[in-house]
Image: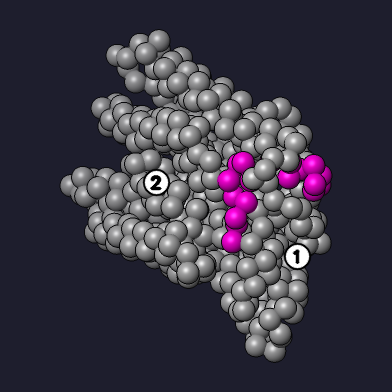
């Protein structure tokens, strides 16, 4: 359990991001249209650097059970700061190329990061909802920045309408859990006779978060939102929303298991915790088997569905943003399977593989979309694969780091994506042969990792399609090269180095 700490040291990174957003907002009216895109991203970059420095000295503990910080949460917050770094640089390229007159998006992207960090740190349902709404309300207007674009208008309408519905679903689930436990804290003890209400509340809260994650069948908003938003906004939301929502779902899942086991919590749990078999001894064998079946259906079934839909859908995409949207659907499925590791059948739950997979995915997909912002030009006219032919030959630095990002998404060694997928499949095989569900043969359960591995190879073909295009000879549909801004060049380079380091030293950097 985590100790109690004071407000200022625990919330230091969040406060720095808020001050950075306010400084950007105050400076914006005093700058000319050109200077806004020249200086405002650097204010945001300075707040990212200061927040990362403050994070290093943030203690592990909790603030009255509302927000908590531990080693895993600190690592995920650092990933969010990297994603913000990439988003600011990519936005600078988009807004300056589009000749956007305002500087408000630089403020919104920093406030969205505040919401994402609060979601990662939340240890009760109200705090999680506040963070979720701050994140969502800042992203909605950024998705609709291109007001004259029909794609942008359709994207923001779908995202906002569906987001409101699933926020209500989450709130209803939270109210049911409160009625069953008498507390808004995660991990509360279920009152006698209210287990059914608690299970339904958990399911509805999980559905609300699965929408944010973009896991099938709650993924229909993501391709349109990714395609309608500027590539810089897409670069940010592809990483930040995934990190925030999966961290929140992991917190909810671990605390749900503790509640089902009837173990009283005195303070919030660390996300690094391993739930051992002794915690489940208080459950009847029938209840434990039912719990395993629910996990197999929710995380195994929806995970495989998401992997299948995402992996097959990427093959037919010509828009890079839509392709990476469906890639996000597939990767959400892989991370969903990680919620059953290392072996729920033997009573162990440890999400370290999921956290590592999440960090590698967020850096790779946000980095790839930031590279797209550098190559696609005004209004993202070069978003199609055919328009990117020869782009890496004209801009070798961006082309090289884009290749690294896509190699990690495809799961090629020695990138972090390969290490994450290897650990994930290794854990799934252990689940199969330890008897995940009694009465079901291991040969039948072997279909889960087998099908997932097959679709991993299928989706890799789509990433290779982009790599081949950017390194090929320029075609008639390709665009003239434009030099990448200094900030964007440095940002994608640093992110690529971080991704390589994450693959080379997984245990040292993220406990993978």
Q: Does the magenta run of residues contain 386? A: yes
Mark 2 is surrounded, within 10 Å at the Cα level, by few (under 14), some (14 to 19) or many (20 or more) other residues, namely: many
In this image, 23 relative to 485: left or right?
left
Farthest residue in the bottom direction? 30
Mark 1 is surrounded, within 10 Å at the Cα level, by few (under 14), some (14 to 19) or many (20 or more) other residues, namely: some
Closer-to-camera residue (295/216): 216
In this image, 2 relative to 390: left or right?
left
Residue carrying label 1: 49
Q: Is residue 403 above or below residue 440?
A: below
Quadrant of the snapshot with the C terminus: top right
Q: Does the magenta run of residues contain 220? A: no
Residue 114: where, in percent of width, then height? 56, 67
Residue depicted at 62% across the width and 82% down the height: 25
Residue depicted at 71% across the width and 85% down the height: 32
Residue carrying label 2: 219
Residue depicted at 45% across the width and 35% down the height: 313
Disc 1 + disc 2, Cβ < 8 Å: no
The span from disc 1 to disc 2 (Cα, nearest Å) is 33 Å
Q: Is residue 106 above or below residue 286?
A: below
In this image, 209 relative to 426: left or right?
left
Q: Is residue 233 above or below residue 254?
A: below
Residue 505: where, in percent of width, then height? 76, 36
Residue stretch rendered in magenta on the structure: 379-397
């Amino acid at each position: 359990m985590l100790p109690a700490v004071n407000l200022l040291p625990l919330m230091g990174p969040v406060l720095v991001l808020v001050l950075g957003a306010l400084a950007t907002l105050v400076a914006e009216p005093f700058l000319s249209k050109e200077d806004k895109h020249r200086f405002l991203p650097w204010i945001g970059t300075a707040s990212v650097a200061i927040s990362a420095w403050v994070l290093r000295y943030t203690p592990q503990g909790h603030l009255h059970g509302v927000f908590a910080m531990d080693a895993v949460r600190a690592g995920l917050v650092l990933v969010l700061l990297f994603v913000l770094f990439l988003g600011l640089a990519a936005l600078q390229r988009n807004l300056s190329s589009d000749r956007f007159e305002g500087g408000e998006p630089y403020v919104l992207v920093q406030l969205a990061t505040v919401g994402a960090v609060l979601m990662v740190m939340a240890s009760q349902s109200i705090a999680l909802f506040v963070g979720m709404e701050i994140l969502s309300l800042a992203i909605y207007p950024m998705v609709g920045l291109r007001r004259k674009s029909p794609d942008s208008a359709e994207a923001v309408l779908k995202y906002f309408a569906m987001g409101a519905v699933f926020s209500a679903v989450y709130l209803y689930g939270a109210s049911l859990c409160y009625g069953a436990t008498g507390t808004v804290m995660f991990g509360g003890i279920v009152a006698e006779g209210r287990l059914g209400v608690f299970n339904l509340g958990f399911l509805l809260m999980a559905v609300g978060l699965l929408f944010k994650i973009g896991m099938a069948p709650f993924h229909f908003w993501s391709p349109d939102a990714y395609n309608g938003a500027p590539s810089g906004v897409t670069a940010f939301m592809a990483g930040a929303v995934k990190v925030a929502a999966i961290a929140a779902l992991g917190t909810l899942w671990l605390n749900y298991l503790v509640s089902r086991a009837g173990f009283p919590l005195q303070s919030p749990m660390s996300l690094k915790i391993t739930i051992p078999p002794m915690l489940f001894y208080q459950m009847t064998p029938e209840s434990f088997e039912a719990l395993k079946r629910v996990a197999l259906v929710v995380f195994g079934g929806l995970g495989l569905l998401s992997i299948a839909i995402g992996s097959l859908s990427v093959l037919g995409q010509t828009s890079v943003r839509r392709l990476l949207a469906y890639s996000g659907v597939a990767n959400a499925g892989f991370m969903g399977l990680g919620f059953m590791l290392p072996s729920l059948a033997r009573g162990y739950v440890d999400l370290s593989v999921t956290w590592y997979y999440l960090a590698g995915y967020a850096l790779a997909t946000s980095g790839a979309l930031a590279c797209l912002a550098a190559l696609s030009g005004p209004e993202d006219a070069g978003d199609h694969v055919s328009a990117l032919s020869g782009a890496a030959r004209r801009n070798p630095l961006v082309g090289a780091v884009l290749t690294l990002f896509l190699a990690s998404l495809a799961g090629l060694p020695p990138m972090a994506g390969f290490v994450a997928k290897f650990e994930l499949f290794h854990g799934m095989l252990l689940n199969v042969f330890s008897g995940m569900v009694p009465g079901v043969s291991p040969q039948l359960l072997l279909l889960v990792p087998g099908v997932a591995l097959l679709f991993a190879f299928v989706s890799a073909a789509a990433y290779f399609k982009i790599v081949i295009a950017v390194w090929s000879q320029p075609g008639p549909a390709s665009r003239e090269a434009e030099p990448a801004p200094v900030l964007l060049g440095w940002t994608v380079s640093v992110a690529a180095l971080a991704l390589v380091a994450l693959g080379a030293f997984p245990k040292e950097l993220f406990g993978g």
